[in-house]
Amino acid sequence: MTQAAVSELDERVPGRRWTVRLDAAGRGTAAVRISCSRPACAGQRLPSAAAGRAAAVAHLKAHLRAAPAPRAGAYCACRADGCHTHLPDTGGRARAEPWRCGGPVVLAVITDREGRWWQAMECCSRCAAATPGAKTAATSQAPGPQTTATVTATGAGAPQFSDHQVPAGPLPAPRSAPVRRRPPQVKIAQRVIPHDLRPVALRDELIELGDLFRAYQQRTEPDLALLADLQERKARAFTAWADVSGIVSLRLEARRAEQAATAARFQHQQRTGLTPSSTEPAGNGPAVARLLTVPTQWDHARSVLAHVADHTPLPGPDARLLVLMLTLRTAHTGTGNLVGQDVTALGLTDPEDLVEKLTGCGWLILPGTARDLLASRPENPTPITVPSLAPHEDGTGPFTFGKKMRTKLSGWAQKVVSDKKLRKAKAAAGTRLLALTLATQTDASGILGPGGQGLALNALTAWAPVDSGELQHLVDQLTAADWLTDAALTDAQLTGQLTERVLPLTCPLRA
């Protein structure tokens, strides 16, 4: 090979490649996790394998839509792993017909038969055709050199590729690269949205929100309900932007948007006849004065339950309930105060042993012993520390809400687990944890499930870790405690409705 050909090969770049994986979220749960090899893509948790596969395919399609066209000058990504078409003969003899890459560079998609991973890669069309199950998503405009290929000019036809030949004649002068114009800047809240921000769905959401806010500013009459919805969407989008970029000021902007949404919602309620802590209009039936008053607070309550489901260090409903209550006490700074009655009132089987196990594994730090904690009184509370909840060096933590929101969420959870009828029935930790879960999984009228369609058992047991055989007993306890009515438990789901008595404690799902 001539020096020019070697130099040309050195300048080629490896083909792009990325993989989306689907893995189990943990033992004892049907939930799955989605991960992407792109560094900017955050992981996702889905309640079932079917939902996970749908989300993984959608994530890969979003990448394919956003990815630039295949580069004609790239060599096969599959060669980096030594695909079977590129491997030499293992017996030490040369191949009778050595493999030759050829054809234009394509963007190929492959997946395993079990549906556990999906991979997109740049390779030549010949390698894509030789790879079982590969599908071509895009093709480069002009075929380019492959990993070991050089181009031989053959007249007006397409270039021919060879593993060993050197160009027979001089190559045509390369065309001058087109001038790339910088894409126009798109802004939201005086912030420029990076053109390479990933995931693409987040960038699209920020661009759409910027357009909607600018359109709202042109309105002649205010619409506070619409403004509150926009601010809530902005809070979620800026939180996701902060997660992928690590910019602390974005998280602060998200908190200000949450506060603006709460204020706009309250003003809307005052103007339209809604009670300050109600989501039902006056005159259309009894208003529900909920303890948590706005959708943002309901979403935060569900986020804490989901975090605890993923990060409880010990198995069982007793550990899950105690970790949940301690998380709500320490969510803002990783520290808080606790008295013995806060623990003994939860209906735990052996609270002292459970506290010792949490301190033994390092999840909880106490200044004394578990017995000292259980003996502490309100006038002398015990300071506790949960290291995993302490803010990072950049000021971020696992939750986006502030100190005031933490206090509201903690008070709400305490109100649920210490419900008078649950205490009177001496309900166990599993029953109280199920009551908390159901309170966050209803519609506005208290019917269980999204749209009142009921709750899937695999999702329910992921939040409240009890065996399906024990679930009927817990449902019966909640029914006897006037918490749940018209309950029906099958092998697949739980249907029913929370009673009017406990509607003020509910956190309705978004329609």
Image: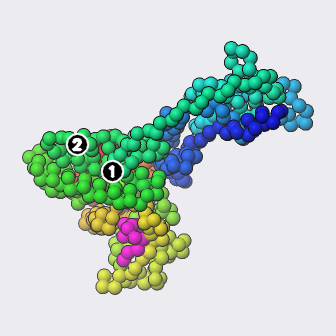
Q: Is residue 478 left or right of residue 85?
A: left
**Magenta residues?**
326-337
**Can you identify the residue that label 2 sits on?**
216
**Which corner quadrant holds the N terminus?**
top right
**Which corner quadrant holds the C terminus?**
top left
Q: Residue at x 62, y 36 (%)?
A: 121
For badge 2, the amino acid type reads: Tyr
Based on the picture, tell me whether residue 11 belongs to the magenta stretch.
no
Based on the picture, tell me whether residue 327 belongs to the magenta stretch.
yes
Residue 483 image offset from top left, x and y in percent: 27, 56
Q: Is residue 468 above or below residue 220?
A: below
Of pointers 2 and 1, the one earlier in the residue sequence:
1
Q: Is residue 176 left or right of residue 431?
A: right
Q: Residue furthest left?
A: 283
- Density class for disc 1 (Cα within 10 Å; few <14, some 14-19, many ≥20) is few
**Can you identify the residue that label 1 sits on?**
190
Q: Is residue 301 left or right of residue 4?
A: left
